[in-house]
Image (cartoon, grey):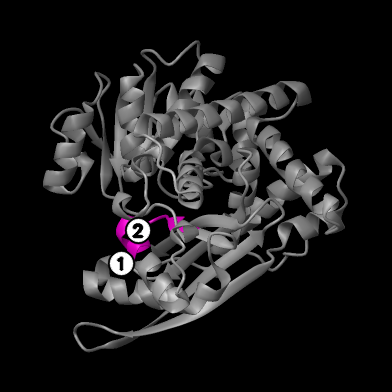
Amino acid sequence: MATPFEEVASSSLLSQQIKRLYNTGRLLGLDDETVEALATPERVLEVKMTIRLKDGRVRTFVGWRSQHNSALGPYKGGVRYHPSSTRDEVVALSMMMTWKNSLLLLPFGGGKGGIRVDPKTLDKEDLEKLSRKYIQQIYMYIGSDKDIPAPDVNTDSQVMAWFLDEYIKVTGRQDFGAFTGKPVEIGGIAVREYSTGLGVATIAKMAAEKFLNGIEGKTVIVQGFGNVGTYTVKFLSEMGAKVIGVSDSKGGVIDPEGLDYNELLNVKKATGSVMNYPKGKKVTNEELLTSECDILIPAALENVIHRGNAEKVKAKLIVEAANGPLTADADLTMKRRGIPVVPDILANAGGVVGSYVEWANNKMGEILEEEEQKKLVISRMEKAFNAVYTEYQKLGDVDLRTAAMALAVERVYKAMKAMGQL
């Protein structure tokens, strides 16, 4: 079917998301004009940041903030720093945030930001300059009741602290709820650091109970050992799963006897890569994705499981910890092969649930204890999984992504309809 986005590269993340939205629209009985309204972002900011580096050079960077949909509340989503960031990628990720926030019944719309930069090429002082310049360019469009940025790829609590400080300087508003993922000293919460990994592990456990007779003793491979992958390994190990394979950008390791979480951390810190783990077999990321296991958790980049390798995947269950790790073609392959895929908008939503708890605390002036924060994240993830699984059973011949998208899109559609936007 022709779409209003025909100029988008067919292999791009945005193209994948548009295809999925059109399929969901057909399932819900929505006409193409309505789907076009749901797909089109409300605003996309493109900004230029020129800074003088510490070494005296002047460099110019380009960044974006996509505000996709606000029918359910202020825009919410992270800001990533990456050399391959593009406008289309940021728009796609903001669309995914709309569905994610809707599915988790959060009072947010979808937003996302990105700057095309390799942060490893900048020292801390230059990174701070860039971060502050970004806020100077978008401050009038953000705030706790407008758009609430958070950490994403290559950004962290320190970047959020710079964002907040610059925002207060240029607006004169002590709006601590304008950003989440902040240091605990300035309104952040302990659980936000690990809430995405906690959510992934919680969803993996629930999916294993439905499809694999439980998580205890099940073999798990996690591709990606950043923040999300690290905490996913930690919590799944505590739940009784047997993590047998992990990787980072340099490579990975597989040991059928199981990997020790603390030793993985030590090896990563000491050598820069988990592939230097002393036991097991060194593998490439591609080999890791197609290795034998019960549960495969891609927690790195998008489109890593595609038409070229989907048939080789040997996992019995896939849980998407990254955004968009499976292409639409791979989805069809997994459905045909009977391999359940828990979609990203459900599986990795623990991060935005943690952000919601932080935002609500900032707005109310209250601080919850860490255990209470953790229980809130787990309970919201469990509720969402149960809703998706119920819809999956009700709809019949569909996959879990379709069920999740149907719930998420329908809620946004109803909100837009009620407000006269459709």
Alpha carbon separation for disc pair 2 and 1: 7 Å
Q: Please state which amino acid type lies under the numbered disc 1.
A: Pro
- Point out the stretch of residues depicted in magenta: 149-161
Q: Is residue 332 magenta?
A: no
Of 82 and 380, which appears nearest the observer?
A: 380
Any part of residue 62 in sight: no
Q: Is residue 153 magenta?
A: yes
Q: Quadrant of the N terminus?
A: bottom right
Q: In the drawing, does residue 387 fall left or right of residue 343?
A: right
Name the residue carrying label 1: 119
As displayed, is residue 91 above or below residue 369?
A: below
Question: Residue 402 lies in what quarter of the image?
Answer: top right
Of 181 and 399, which appears nearest the observer?
A: 181
Name the residue carrying label 2: 154
Of 168 and 225, which appears nearest the observer?
A: 168
Q: What residue is rendered at 23% in x and 29% in y?
A: 261
As displayed, is residue 99 above or below residue 91?
A: above
Q: Please state which amino acid type lies under the numbered disc 2.
A: Asn
